[in-house]
Amino acid sequence: MTWDQFQRLAFEGGWITVQVFVGAALFGTALSLWFGVMSLAPSRTLRIISRVYVETARGVSAIILLFWVAFALPIFLGFQVISPMVSGIIALGTSMGGYGAELVRGGIGSIPKGQTEASVSLSLTFTQRLRYVILPQAVITILPPFGNLNIEVLKGTALVSLIALSDITFEAQKLRNSRIVLLEQGLTAPTTAMIFSTTILIYLAMSQIVALLFRRLEFRLGGRWHKVKV
Amino acid sequence: MTYVMAQAAVETKWDWEVAWEFLPIIAEGLWVTVRATLVGTIIGMILGLILAVLRRSPRWYIRLPTIAVIEFVRSTPLLIQLFFIFFVLPGFGVTLSPFVSLSLGLGIHYGCYTSESYRAGIESVGRGQWDAAVAINLSTATMWTSVILPQAIPTVIPALGNYLVAMLKDAPLGSAISVVGVLAAAKGLASLTFRVTEAFTLVGILFLAVSIPAAIFVRYLERRYGFDRT
């Protein structure tokens, strides 16, 4: 494999993958917090809405959701088309939010009620209570499985290649499909095995980096050195 | 191709007649997808147990490669693994049909996840059991089959159920390696009739109709079989 081909695979494709990953992770985290907190609301309606979201987001696989967002949603909303990158971010983020919301719910639920009561007696508003008392304590519990969830999202970004977004997987496919042309022109045409082996190693490296980042984050937030199970 | 298709299809909203016509075709595709999941589950459950036992081997030349394989498969996207089986293996003389490739890919991928669940179950069996088995001179095989596994497996069942549901949601990936499952049906219908909304929304709904009962079943399993061993 030439350096040029590798560079296109790892860096150009990788850049798209990173963008989708970061976008989906941020969106997913926001949804997780939002619906996680909503599932513990006093209002029964809110709790039901949250439950519907969680069951739907977890029940529909990311790939089905991805295709639906990319092709069916534009028509429902009246757009001509939703860009593959945005579709990917929305779909993966929504799917992640379903699982993340359960983690947030569990994490917050593990905080002793006394904390809530003390905050109320100190006249903290709901938002202040969440931001300064509850969430900082919940984060330690939530973080290890949340890290795993993020790595799942990273692996999920490979799906956007199926809606023709030029991520690592799509670049690998392009390279594979161009083999005939390359061979005709007498240029270096890496074998299919080589292409996918390289691709898989790139993803492996990225997973390990993300896992490492989460481990450091846990450490800095005061947790022990949990082994983040990939 | 699919990207261009989205731009051309500016159809009106929902047409119930079209949805009704699509239903049997998509249901047929769903059945293929479900079958692949079931085969994958069987492979995964068996492989997971084998990997879990190997991982506990006292011989480093068995244990370390097993750990490496498990972590490798868990750190990389299922899609790439499917591509590997379907596109790379033929180069080494092993050509498998799309369905078999999908089932095998699902089985191997989730086998590595289930192996960790098996491991947790095995490790939860009290130390005394191992010592007692040695003390009454049971062979390794008898110790495993008559003492350890019967105590380890029940706790693992809910986790296996969860992975079955997860596998069901990943099975549509087969469309990327030409499995004529639910996603291929939807894409085919959409490109044939340009009715993207009905096609992909129906897929989502049918999918939920299968995965939510499955999730409820898993929760039942958790109640029935899960118990804490202090």
Image (tube, rainbow, N blue to C red):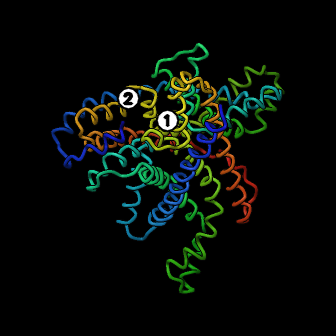
Q: Distance between the residues labelled 2 and 1?
A: 14 Å
Q: In this view, does A101 lie above or below B17?
A: below
Is residue A16 visible in the rendered image? The answer is yes
Residue A53 on image: x %, y % = 40, 56
Location of the N terminus of chain A by quadrant is: top right
Q: What element carries label 1?
A: helix
Task: Pinpoint the chain carrying mark 2.
Answer: B
Q: Residue, x 62% and y 53% (percent of image)?
A: A147
Compared across the picture, whether B134 is left or right of A89 comes to right
B169 and A204: which one is in front?
A204
Compared across the picture, whether B225 is left or right of B67 comes to left
- Residue B133 found in image quarter: top right
Residue B117 on image: x %, y % = 63, 38
Amino acid carrying label 2: it is: Gly
Q: Is residue B85 above or below residue A163?
A: above
The mark closer to the camera, 2 or 1, is 2
Q: What element carries label 2?
A: loop
Instruction: Look at mark 2 in the image and give the residue it sits on.
Output: B181
A123 and B4: which one is in front?
B4
Task: Pinpoint the chain carrying mark 1.
Answer: B
Q: Residue, x 49% and y 35% (percent of image)?
A: B167
Say few, some or many: other residues with alpha carbon within 10 Å of mark 1 (under 14 / 14 to 19 / 20 or more): many
Instruction: Look at mark 1 in the image and give the residue it sits on.
Output: B167
Q: Residue, x 40% and y 57% (percent of image)?
A: A51
- Residue B191 found in image quarter: top left
Is residue B230 visible in the rendered image? The answer is no
Ranked by sequence position, the earlier of labels 2 and 1 is 1
Amino acid carrying label 1: it is: Met
Q: Which residue lies furthest to the front in this view?
A: A185
Q: Residue, x 75% and y 29% (percent of image)?
A: B65
